[in-house]
Image: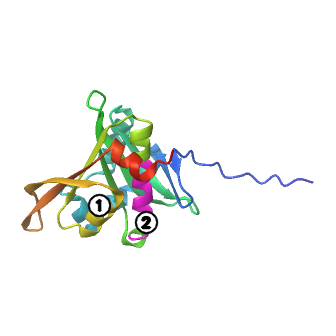
Amino acid sequence: MTDTKPTKARIPRLLETERIYLRLFEPTDVDAYFPSLFDEEMRRLTGTQGSFTHQQVERFVEEASQDSSRIMLLICLQDTDEMIGEIALMDMHAKNRSGHIRIAIDSAAHQGKGYGTEAMKLLLDYGFGICNLHRIELEVYAFNDRAIRTYEKLGFKREGVRRDVLFYNHRYHDAILMSMLEEEFRERYVRA
């Protein structure tokens, strides 16, 4: 007699490592994603000033999925399928072959474990190797030392400072513009 237990459907994965995978948002993900938008530390690190309704988030995810200049992915753990953050490649411009990358790991419990670094390498590889981008940039607030160190370790170069760009918690904060070019990525990560 064979075991006829139903097997759990495998979630489609766009990119993956041994520890994490990146996948597209599904409409059912909004319920799990929504509470992370109200995490105090995450709001500070991302400079999030507004608040959002569940319906606004549903609409944003739907509109983002229709935007050909953007790919927005969830970061999930291989072992548990737990959603631990999001990463996006946005504002992709075909003629200039450029884009903007952003990432957020949702809770302190998952930060500092290298998940963000793995996710960034995956999406950078995708951006340079599949989307044929030449330049990928990001912006990070000057008070986010851990993120700055991570981006520099990945190979991003500082390009400049946007002064007093964010007003948060009674103070103005600078943003640092960083970028990586395709040849810099290939020299560091792609083996012939």
- The answer to whether residue 14 is left or right of residue 158 is right
Residue lying furthest right in this view? 1
Q: Nearer the viewer, residue 178 or 111?
A: 178
Label 2 crowd (10 A; few <14 / some 14-19 / many >=20) = few
Which mark, residue 105? none
- Where 28 sits versus 115, above or below? above
Q: Main secondary structure of the magenta part?
A: helix
Report the residue marked by disc 1.
152
> x, y (%) of residue 171?
7, 67
Residue type at mark 2: give it: Gly
Residue 180 seen by the camera: yes
Q: Nearer the viewer, residue 76 or 57?
A: 76
Q: Residue at the spot x=47%, y=44% of the render? A: 26
Label 1 crowd (10 A; few <14 / some 14-19 / many >=20) = some
Q: Nearer the viewer, residue 40 or 87?
A: 87
Residue type at mark 1: give it: Glu
* SS at mark 2 in the image: loop
Distance from Cα at disc 2 to Cα at disc 1:
14 Å
Q: Residue at the spot x=54%, y=46% of the render? A: 13
Query: In the figure, residue 51 lies in which quadrant?
Result: bottom left
User: Magenta segment range?
Assistant: 112-123
